[in-house]
Amino acid sequence: MKSFTLATTALFIGATFMALTSPPGRMKPMKLVKVWETDTTLRTPESVLYDGNNTLYVANIDGKSDSLDGSGFISKVSLDGKIENLHWTSGLNAPKGMGLYKDKLYVTDVYRLVCINTANGQAEKTWDAVGKNAFLNDVTVAKDGTVYVSDSRFDKIYRLQDGKWEVWMEGEQLNKPNGVLAVGKDKLMIGSTKIGALQSVDVTTKTITKIADGMANTDGIVPEGKSNYFVSDWNGQVFHVSADGTKQQLLDTREQKINAADIDYVAKKKLVIVPTFFKNKLVAYQFE
């Protein structure tokens, strides 16, 4: 009887220890299941943006990532993966990140931010970066219409607010920011490619807090539920990052040399949309 009691006690203690020390991510396994992919008529698709209705905007670099060649364009793709308008807007320079606010689509254009009217696809206004050789990358728009833009070459974040365009934040502490995501009015999430981390910036104090790291060349950041995020690594990975910083890899296509650039998430269909860059297509995955 005594030996049985000791064994039972040991098992209980061991089980309790495992429950307390096991990463929270293991309690709820998550995965991405491929649903569809487009044909390969896209040209170096760098980012995708859902319009909240039935359309995906796709930014096509179509050339080198910093070339001022005017060959870049924006496509429209349906939610079932059909390319509806390949050259909806053309004449851009290596377009990358995009952000929507009402009927305006904001797109980075190497050294400038371009505002496009979604009603007709025409560029209405541009804002130039400060200095030479800027590399404007991602765009996000806060609920009040404030636009944030990352410059991943010079450790800067620009802000367009009430018509004023300025360098809002800069410095090595940004660690080569790529992806940006406005959360409400008070928080900005950034993907710091130099350290492979998802970080949070307090908009009022500009205090930076690291949420999770180990994600290599961080690119797109999109929300999944309250304070949870999908984060892509351009090399070909997609991660789920929980509010407490718990990270889980959902996709790894590095061996197939398929990139995962600036992603988006269609919450109503639970679809993660991945631009594959050199493979010239979008791939949609069901989040389960």
Image: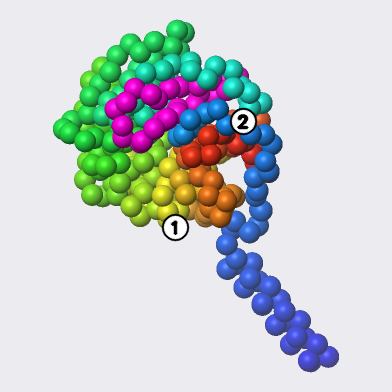
Q: Helix, strand or loop at disc 2?
A: loop
Q: Helix, strand or loop at disc 1?
A: loop
Q: Position of residue 227 (x, y in %)?
A: 50, 41
Using a 10 Å C-alpha cutoff, classify the residue at mark 2 as few (fewer than 14 neighbours), some (14 to 19) or many (20 or more). Answer: some
Residue 62: quarter of image: top left
Magenta stretch containing residue 244, yes or no? no
Magenta stretch containing residue 65, yes or no? yes
Residue 148: quarter of image: top left
Horizontally, residue 3 falls left or right of residue 14, namely right
The N terminus - image quarter: bottom right
**Highlighted magenta segment, given as a residue range:** 49-77
Horizontally, residue 174 falls left or right of residue 81, namely left
Tell me the number on the disc at residue 38: 2
Residue type, mark 1 in image:
Gly
The C terminus - image quarter: top right
Disc nearer the start of the sequence (1/2): 2
At a point 46% along the width and 34% down the height, the residue shown is 44
Residue 160 seen in render: yes
Tell me the number on the disc at residue 214: 1
Pick the residue in front: 33 or 90: 90
